[in-house]
Image: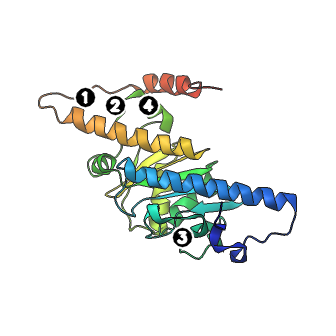
Amino acid sequence: MTEQLGGGRQDGIEQDGSERDAIQQDGIEQAWGELVAAARRTVTDGLVVGTSGNVSVKVGDTILVTPSGVPYDRLRPKDAVGVDTDGNQLFGTLTPTSELPMHLAIYRTTDAEAVVHTHAVHATAVSTLVPELPPIHYMTGVLGGPARVARYAPYGSDELAENMLRALRERTGCLLQNHGTITYGTTLDQAYDRTAQLEWMSRLWLTASAVPGHTPTLLSPGQLREAEDRLRGYGQR
């Protein structure tokens, strides 16, 4: 990269000449590039509008997060923002996302390595209608079961983070009432895919529910367990 990450090494990443630090620096730079690409994708995929939503990824003990209120297409390597699990800013000159409490709560209580939060329109609409997204499709299994709706609380608040954690119990994604979605994974790609699947299933349920005189067929708990088992072995190894 031609630009230094995080506003230069003076902002918290000091180069001491050791191979370990050089490897860590390279890992953070690569992760930041992937994070920015994912954040931009949330806009192009229609999952957020403007600067809404946020993305984070964990690299060792450092959590990289999108900054607050900055358009994703303007983010550069020098704009990298890193915090620790207590929310202390390690490097970067921009303010971390206002939703940092939700991201930190997930990293403290799960095996998450990446978190994606969106304001996806169909999922947000569902969050205003039901206490959980009905199991309309077997991809419900990628979330560990029907996505619950976390009770509304002001954005960026500790209360919202607490409500979210309750909704995420034994799940890898949930809806945020009158707000949006949040998902996590062991990779950024996995967290993003879960976000996309959650929005797609929300759209599917809304579409099926809108047909007059008909009620969507839902999957049984046994069918969902079978789907979860099959999905664990899905894809390349």
| Residue 1, position as x, y percentages in the image | 66, 60
For numbered disc 2, what is the local secondary structure? loop
Front-lying residue, 144 or 113? 113
Disc 2 residue type? Ile
The correct choice, above or below, for 125 with respect to 75 in the image is: above
Q: Residue at x 33, y 47 (%)?
A: 123
Residue 89 located left or right of residue 202: right
Pointer 2 local density, CA inside 10 Å: few below 14, some 14–19, many at least 20: some
For numbered disc 4, what is the local secondary structure? helix
- Residue 7: in sight, yes or no? yes
Label 4 vs label 3, nearer the camera: 3
Q: Residue at x 32, y 40 (%)?
A: 202
Kindly report the distance in space between the C-alpha atoms of the residues bearing marks 2 and 1: 7 Å
Q: Residue at x 80, y 60 (%)?
A: 22
Sequence-earlier tag: 3 or 1 = 3
Mark 3 touches mark 1? (CB < 8 Å): no
Residue on which disc 1 sits = 216
Label 2 vs label 4, nearer the camera: 4
Residue on which disc 2 sits = 136
Pointer 1 local density, CA inside 10 Å: few below 14, some 14–19, many at least 20: some
The label shown at residue 96 is 3
| Residue 101, position as x, y percentages in the image | 53, 65
Disc 3 residue type? Pro
Mark 2 touches mark 1? (CB < 8 Å): yes
Kindly report the distance in space between the C-alpha atoms of the residues bearing marks 4 and 3: 32 Å
Pointer 3 local density, CA inside 10 Å: few below 14, some 14–19, many at least 20: many
| Residue 108, position as x, y percentages in the image | 63, 58
- Single out the residue that lies furthest toward the left: 212
Disc 1 residue type? Pro
Mark 2 touches mark 4? (CB < 8 Å): no
Kindly report the distance in space between the C-alpha atoms of the residues bearing marks 2 and 4: 9 Å
